[in-house]
Amino acid sequence: MANGSRRKPKKTRPDPPDLPDGFDPAPGTLESGAFWDCVEAGADVVVAETVADVKLQESRWVDADLSGRRLTGLHCRDVVFEHCDLSGAVLDDAVLTRVTFTNCRLTGVVLSGAELTDVHISDSRADLANLRMARAKYLLIENTSLHAADFYEFAGTSCGLLGCDLAEAVFEDARLTDTDLHGSTVDDVRGALSLRGSRISSEQILPLGAALLAAVQIQVTNGPAT
């Protein structure tokens, strides 16, 4: 008898952006209230220090300079960022769906309160990134430095931080479900108890064990206190 209750294969990676076969050229300036649909932008696009209520969909941006910019009310769906500089950019409460960042500078980027669904960050630098109180589902960050990144009260489901530098990252009060940390540096992470249920590899046992001992204030000494 045929099995009528076959399970769908488990989703293990973010869905990629759904892009058109061709793009229109982007406007020369990104202005507040802009709606970009099916456009390709380059380094020549002018972006003001503060831009509000921007919506990008089914688009590609290469070599963007968004460093230090404040983009409030940003919504991106099916968008590719390549070789872009978002260091110090403030993207509070951004909504990103099926978005990729490849070879980007994200040092100090602020994504606090952001909603991240099917987001893939790879081969980038995101030291000191701020993801406080962000919510993520199928967020995959690969081969990216997240040194001292802030995941305070971050809520993540089916996420992966693979091959990343997580040394000194903050996970205090984070809520992680079905998370992979394979290949990542986990030395001196803060809030290690919030990583409960995560999957690691054997070489991560010792450094993460030290962080867990510190979290519960267990001291390793040569003998009893005198």
Image: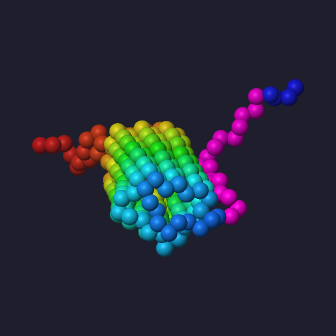
Q: Give the percent coordinates (x, y) of residue 46.
A: 44, 69
Between residues 59 and 106, which one lies in front from this camera angle?
A: 59
Q: Is residue 145 above or below residue 186?
A: below
Q: Position of residue 157 (x, y in %)?
A: 51, 40
Q: Quadrant of the N terminus?
A: top right
Q: Residue furthest bottom?
A: 44
Image quadrant in which the C terminus is located: top left
Which residue sits at x=65%, y=53%? 18
Side of 194 where 218 appears, left or right: left
The rendered magenta stretch, by its main secondary structure, is classed as loop
Q: Residue at x 29, y 45 (%)?
A: 214
Q: Is residue 40 left or right of residue 88?
A: right
Quick check: is 76 in the magenta stretch? Answer: no
Residue under the point 46% across and 62% down: 30
Whether residue 124 can be seen here: yes
Count numbered badges in the picture.
Answer: 0
Residue at image x 65%, y 41%?
10
Q: Position of residue 100 (x, y in %)?
A: 55, 57
> Could you say where residue 56 lies in the image, as x and y percent from the top left?
53, 55
Q: Quadrant of residue 4?
A: top right
Q: Can the viewer see residue 166?
A: no
Q: Is residue 146 left or right of residue 217?
A: right
Q: Which residue occupies the extreme top position in the image?
A: 1
Q: How is the image coloured?
A: rainbow
The verdict on residue 19 being magenta is yes
Span of residues in magenta: 5-22
